Image (cartoon, coloured by chain):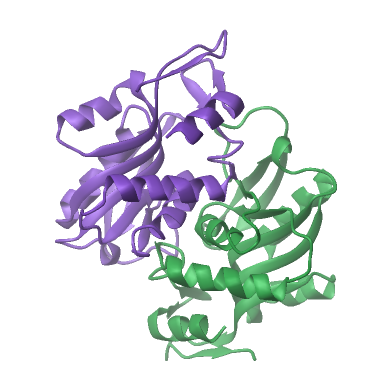
Chain colours: A purple, B green
Amino acid sequence: MQELEERIQSEGTVKEGNVLKVDAFLNHQCDVRLFDRMGAAWAEHFAGKKIDKILTIEASGIGIACVAAQHFGNVPVVFAKKAQSINLDGDQYVTSVYSFTKQKEFPVIVSKKYLNAGEHVLLIDDFLANGKALHGLIGLCREAGASVTGIGIAVEKGFQGGGDALRAEGYDIDSLAIVDAMDPATGEITFRH
Amino acid sequence: MQELEERIQSEGTVKEGNVLKVDAFLNHQCDVRLFDRMGAAWAEHFAGKKIDKILTIEASGIGIACVAAQHFGNVPVVFAKKAQSINLDGDQYVTSVYSFTKQKEFPVIVSKKYLNAGEHVLLIDDFLANGKALHGLIGLCREAGASVTGIGIAVEKGFQGGGDALRAEGYDIDSLAIVDAMDPATGEITFRH
């Protein structure tokens, strides 16, 4: 998606440790007009596929998923939670994921009420790096007996390999920008086309 | 907002300890069509007011705020973060808030880049109970020199007093449903009109 690549080039910053900061428009400050066009792009990619629900993970995926859902017939969005809360009770699907950005292990929780056998689920998230968060969400879907119809990602860090491993497993991933290389010294970002 | 009250009546559940669960449509599974109509309701209430930005707090506020922003000329949405992350760097406004639902103290963080002096800010959140989270966001705005134009809330638990205290301080709060009483034994919910 050319617009997203241009925003990453002009407003993103590359930091040591494989960190790409896009908090000006994607995951701290949110450009909802961009989110809307991202949703349109995913809707075009997944046109004709049956999608009953969008599953994402708190926090940065939520805004993108909710705006994008408007391009999928306003299907429900469910966001997996990263911590127990008194608002979560009853039966839950729970797995554990290591976060690259938070540098710790955290639980990923979805109430069993909101993920059901036979549902066709689109996963959406802001970033795909090593794929650990997505594997967590895929595991929750498998446990529920739901099928993963596709995966919509804003920014894939292609050089970390998580996306290509999931593609090799057969998942249909639509990453709107794939960064194949980035250099913290020069700030240079190379996209896959 | 009649539709929201009806959804709370039909799908909400009252738990011991002043807990109102609305995770079927508001803060775990998200009904984005409802979010859109909530945004329209706030836009009507705050019509004619200058709003440059929407500020919310992760996680449950984000989806509501991003969909609602489409009714405010697609202004940027900034969500305050509740934990440090390697994605957050540079100067930050930080305060500390006690969470009723998580039952612990947590930091509330906004990068100084995304909250600026002179900006007119609309605060949006899913719940208003004792008002601690909102006071945190208001404090960050004050520190930044931004002004709080108004506050849009989905569900206010009126009997916990946070909303009325903020109204007494002069804030223009548009709560789309105000619960004045709820009974965990019978499940009965009484709304303020």
Q: Which is more toward the observer, B79 or A63?
A: A63
> Where residue B180 sits: x, y (%)?
61, 86
Quadrant of the snapshot with the C terminus of chain B = bottom right
Residue A51, above or below A137: below
Please count the marks in the image. 0
Work out which residue is located at the far top of the displayed protein and give it: A185
Q: Within the image, what quadrant is residue B184 found in?
A: bottom left
Task: Determine if residue A132 is in view.
Answer: yes
> Where residue B167 sits: x, y (%)?
79, 74
Residue B113, above or below B19: above
> Where residue A23 sits: x, y (%)?
58, 35
**With A99 as the anchor, is A169 left or right in this view?**
left
Name which residue lies at 53% across and 73% down. B37
Residue B88, above or below A108: above
Name which residue lies at 71% across and 60% down. B122
**With B145 as the anchor, is B86 left or right in this view?**
left
Q: Which is more toward the observer, B116 or B182?
A: B116
Quadrant of the snapshot with the N terminus of chain B = bottom right
Name which residue lies at 53% across and 60% down. B67
Residue A46, above or below B72: above
> Where residue A42 sits: x, y (%)?
35, 46
Task: Determine if residue A21 is in view.
Answer: no
Q: Within the image, what quadrant is residue A85 found in?
A: bottom left
Name which residue lies at 52% across and 45% down. A34
